[in-house]
Image (tube, rainbow, N blue to C red):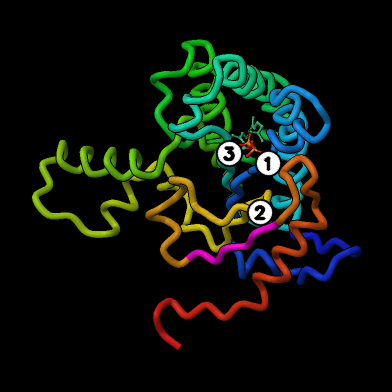
Amino acid sequence: MANLKNSENNIPEKICEKIKHIAFIMDGNGRWAQKRLLPRSQGHVAGLKTFTEIVKYCFKLGIANVTVYAFSTENWNRSEEEVSALMGLLEKNIDENADELIENGIRIIFLGDKTPLSKTLAEKMKRLEERSSHNKGILNVAVNYGARDEIVNAVNALISENKTAVTAEDISEHLYTKNSPDPDLIVRTAGEKRLSNFLLWQAAYSEFYYSDKLWPDFTPADVDLALENFMSRHRKYGGY
Ligand code: FPP
């Protein structure tokens, strides 16, 4: 991963010292498709292209951890057609992009319970996690992820270790995100301002940035705007 300053932006060269983890709630694929009278699945196809471009850009800036919310535990409530389109895209993305990610030093970790996924997809995900486990840059892809489920899982894991009292660190170390620090910045697109069961524990001191752009329209220049805005924040962590 290069620590390159992009000459076309105002992002400081050492942005990666200020921001170790950026997370995206990739919202607005459906509306993007609707505006074009296309099926919702086409919005997700466009969203996948944006995902690929934005993730590459964040790693190019030297940000060590990138997390995306690809499919929530609540997204099963969508039509069978949309769910299967999303699962198909995930599988296609693994088939087509895994090698490039691994060659670029990226470790892929899927956040969430793989049990309800198809056996083929779950195995491809597991294999990709194993194949990339030696890499340093972390791409967390949340699939069948819900933050409340994640916390409940962590507590149950601690109970099964016979713990009778736990610390905040114990919980953090048993979350799906245990390999990454808490997110410094959470970006949500499409004008919505809510967390939607994403990283509830980890977001305790995160900064938030909202963009009105629909996810398929989101560009590296929009990442720059988010980072410039982030750089102007004074993080107090309850102090001054
Ligand atoms: C929310 O937009 C987006 C999702 C539920 C899926 C996100 C998926 C992708 C960006 C593509 C696949 C990604 C990977 C990593 C393989 P929405 O559909 O709720 O939009 P709406 O609110 O406008 O309806």
Position of residue 112 relative to residue 77, above or below, is below
Distance from Cα at disc 2 to Cα at disc 1: 9 Å
Residue 112 in the image: x percent, y percent?
A: 43, 33
Specify start and end residues of the magenta stretch as a single range.
206-211
* Residue kind at label 2, given as amino acid type: Gly
Please report whichever mark, 3 or 1, sits nearer to the chain's N-terminal start.
Answer: 1
Q: Earlier in the sequence, mark 2 or mark 1?
A: 1
Magenta span: predominant SS is strand
Check the image and name the residue furthest to the right: 8
Q: Are marks 2 and 1 in contact (CB under 8 Å)?
A: yes
In the image, what residue occupies the spot 90% across and 64% down? 7
Q: Residues within 10 Å of mark 1 (few under 14, many from 20)?
A: many
Q: Which mark is residue 191?
A: 2
Comparing 233 with 188, the one in front is 188
- Residue occupied by mark 3: 107
Q: Residue at x 46, y 37 (%)?
A: 111
**The C terminus, quarter of image:** bottom left
Q: CA distance from mark 3 to mark 1?
A: 27 Å
Q: Amino acid at mark 3?
A: Arg
Of the residues under marks 2 and 3, which one precedes in the sequence? 3
